Amino acid sequence: MVMKNTSQSFFGILAGLMLGALILLPFHYNLFASDNPAPSVVVDSTPIVRDVHAGTSYAPIVKKVAPSVVNIYSSRTVRMRPMPNPFQDDPLFRQFFGDQMPSDNHEHTRREQSLGSGVIVTSDGYILTANHVVNGADEVKVALGDDDNKKFTAKIIGTDAQTDVAILKIDATGLPAITLGDSDQLEIGDVVLAIGNPFGVGQTVTSGIISALGRHGYGVNRYENFIQTDAAINPGNSGGALVDANGRLIGINTWIATSSGGSEGVGFAVPINMARGVMTGLITHGKVSRGYLGVHPEDVTPALAKAFGLATTSGALVGDVFSNTPAEKAGIKAGDVITEFNGKPVMDANSLTLMVSECAPDTQATVKVFRKGAAKTFNVKLGELPGENPQNENGKISSNSPDTDALDGVTVEDLDPQTREQLQIPDNFKGALVINVDEDSNAADAGVQKNDVIVEIDQQPVTSAEDAVKFAEKAKGDQILLKVWRRVDDFASTSYISVDNTKRKK
């Protein structure tokens, strides 16, 4: 099963490949100046009446909300590299053509168009849609309802690729703005309607239920908290409305999981509460400012729960605390398990990330953690999420010890200056470098990788390869708990790995 965005392209992939590699022409747009007034949206947080004896028709709801859903046509100019003659260097052809060999060395451009949907959220022309519907566009047109004869030129106010949300503005007043709901009150099984323009056939309504909430881990967006629905969503539905049984907007349709290219009953929408926060930031300040705690959270696996003496796998394990961050200043440490944030339970690493990101910078937050069998509460003043991933700045040490076997299939050595420079390992950082992991080992199964730096074994600091071997040989119990430092591209952090110590692989 593959993931597929639900905006629809008018040009096939094959044609693009035949025309050569495409380079987008640059497109620039200006955000509104900072400190603009917040959009005047209508929000209804009244709980829905969940009555199994509801009416037999959704027509009243459709009549109410359909005028608020628009068709979006975006276009961009693409530049095609020159196509050299494949026989340019062939001596036989040169013998006949000489320097007059036919060749197309001219750069060509063409227009690429795509189709999506959007939702009017204010009467003066603000429209919510999906970022991938307008990403890279140099012209965006909006048609109200099915009236393609009257299109408005839309201005891109701002986009947020992290949530796949974009906000447009058209020059119009008295528009039929939709009422926003409260996505935090949704329940699995609630009836929903999806409205958009699938395949360019015109405005279409499909019905279904909420199949799941809080879906994440697909790698589609950085901040994932998707509403899953079985209401049919197809290419062209992206950016369209997902509404509840009262006709309130509760999600922006964004992508589908499909093996055929069409709807298979697994569609996803960005919750309106998340989209609304992004929209407000883009309109009022020209950007989205997110809170920053300064930790690298990870999920609590059953093995880690056992190693840390936890009763459940709920919570977010702090794998690393970055230097000079709110978390470090408040006293939060690596190995803490964050169980509550501002009074709300933290279920896993993703839920903590979402909770923090939805807070404004400088917000005072309370963080409850489990540390070595005891609960502790910290008051933290959140910072602002940096533009790039923070990097660990802990210290390191070097020596020239020979390779040594440890952890049955893991080969380690001391850190040396050349390795530090190559792997960008911070100065004064202590640990044992993993130079090989037998693929048929318990360590490999647990996730230990080449170029990891082991900094702890069973919560004992590792300063050298010798330490790693010694602590591994003395390790007792069903699991060996490792703390490793790892760099992936420009991001580096430490995390915990629990390795099975009950059997040896042969």
Image (tube, rainbow, N blue to C red):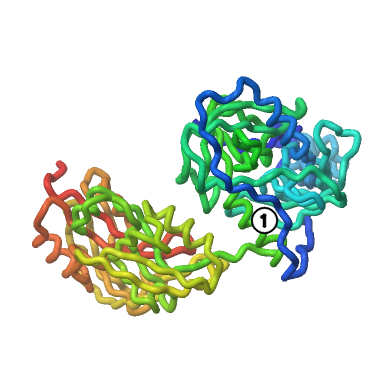
398 up-or-down from 259: above or below? below
In this rendered view, identify the residue nearer to me: 384 or 219: 384
Disc 1 is placed on an element classified as helix
Task: Examine the image and state in which quarter residue 366 appears.
Answer: bottom left
- Classify residue 392 as left or right of residue 71: left
Q: Amino acid at mark 1?
A: Met
Task: Examine the image and state in which quarter residue 406 appears.
Answer: bottom left
The residue depicted at 43 percent of the width and 53 percent of the height is 350
- Where is residue 402? Give x, y as percent: 20, 67
In this rendered view, identify the residue nearer to me: 133 or 55: 55
The residue depicted at 51 percent of the width and 71 percent of the height is 363
**Badge 1 local density, few (<14 within 10 Å), some, or many (20+)?**
many
Residue 453 visible in the current orientation: no
- Classify residue 255 as left or right of residue 316: right
In this rendered view, identify the residue nearer to me: 502 or 382: 382
- Classify residue 431 as left or right of residue 352: left
The residue depicted at 35 percent of the width and 75 percent of the height is 417
Residue 479 visible in the current orientation: yes
- Where is residue 374? Give x, y as percent: 22, 66
- Where is residue 215? Give x, y as percent: 47, 42
224 up-or-down from 432: above or below? above
Task: Examine the image and state in which quarter residue 289 appears.
Answer: bottom right
In this rendered view, identify the residue nearer to me: 319 or 466: 319
Quarter of the picture containing the C terminus is top left
For label 1, the residue is 279
- Where is residue 192? Give x, y as percent: 58, 32
